[in-house]
Amino acid sequence: MAPTAPAPWRLFALLVLIGAVAPFLAYPTFLMKVLCFALFACAFNLLLGFAGLLSFGHAAFFGGAAYVCGYLVRDLGVSPELGILAGAAVAGLLGLVFGALAIRRSGIYFAMITLALAQLVFFLCLQIKATGGEDGLQGIPRGKLLGLFDLSDNLVMYYFVLAVFLGGFWLIHRTVHSPFGQILKAIRENEPRATSLGYDVARYKLLAFVLSATLAGLAGATKALVFQLASLTDAHWHMSGEVVLMTLLGGLGTLLGPAVGAITLVGLENLLADKVGSWVTVIMGVIFVVCVLAFRRGLVGELTALVAGRR
């Protein structure tokens, strides 16, 4: 008899337990960065791993939401929770526009359209006066969550970021295991067959794109509050490449894979940055090539296959 998957509540209980004790074992700011990128990678995986759509433009949603949140909180005095929600909403609207244009094509053409549109967003972030140009938006205040909890306290901010990550991860989990998620998998495996069964494939792709963009924006807006900065790096195409790397490294099409990939990549970057300087990019590239050749299904994918094989 095939082994059954662990109950969802056990997975979330484990994540909550690990998250609760983590700030007492590691630096909270580092952990917050990991959580933001983990949510970003999980959002991207929803599009690529479950819908089969490779986007090279997700930095537009991540960086765009960071700028929107930073501008609202710093310049207009909006509360942090509303700033984050506004950033995610704008990212979702961008996703609706980008998706409506991009899903008309597939494969490399889809990827190139998303990259071109993301470069437009990067150019706007560079040229618009309100974004601060090359300096970005600096000194974004964390403020008080709901007017009660002072987010300038790193520990309070960490638990808020953890709650945002867990909420986003839960939404992705529910989506993947819903009828909508099963249709996305069917489209990924065989789009003509899904069309022949009567599903509006374009509509489902667009919904997946918008949801992925919204969650990516949620991660970007949260990161802007954590580091009190929204910069051009957040909207650069390199960021789109990094999230692809995180997803493939951890395990494409797995729930925890992108989070593991984000932990691995961010951890290695922080570990190697002080030791090798600019060579960190070369080393990360070598690690990526080795992992792709040795672990075709990613770290979590290979581990899952190994455990299933032994059972």
Image (cartoon, helix red, strand yellow):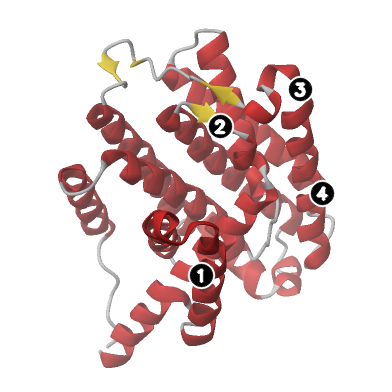
Residue density around tag 1, few if under 14, some if 14–19, many if 20 or more, within 10 Å? some
Instruction: Place residue 27 in its image quadrant.
Output: top left
For marks 2 and 3, give the CA distance.
20 Å
Residue at image mark 4: 116
Q: Which of pointers 1 and 3 indicates the residue nearer the eye?
A: 1
Residue density around tag 4, few if under 14, some if 14–19, many if 20 or more, within 10 Å? some
Q: Disc 4, disc 2: CB below 8 Å?
A: no
Residue at image mark 3: 128
In the displayed structure, 244 sits above or below 234; it is below
Residue at image mark 2: 88
- Given the image, on which type of amino acid does mark 3 rest? Ile
Q: Quadrant of the N terminus?
A: bottom left
- Given the image, on which type of amino acid does mark 1 rest? Ile
For marks 4 and 1, give the CA distance.
28 Å
Q: Which of pointers 2 and 1 indicates the residue nearer the eye?
A: 1
Residue 226 in the figure: left or right of residue 24: right
Give coordinates of residue 23: x percent, y percent. Answer: 21, 42
Residue 294 in the figure: left or right of residue 212: left
Q: Which mark is residue 283?
A: 1
- Given the image, on which type of amino acid does mark 2 rest? Ala
In the displayed structure, 136 sits above or below 163; it is above
For marks 3 and 4, give the CA distance.
18 Å
For marks 1 and 3, give the CA distance.
35 Å
Whichever of callouts 2 and 1 sits on the residue coming sooner in the sequence is 2
In the displayed structure, 237 sits above or below 138; it is below
Give coordinates of residue 200: x percent, y percent. Answer: 73, 56
Q: Which of pointers 2 and 3 indicates the residue nearer the eye?
A: 3
Whichever of callouts 3 and 4 sits on the residue coming sooner in the sequence is 4
Q: Which of pointers 3 and 4 indicates the residue nearer the eye?
A: 3
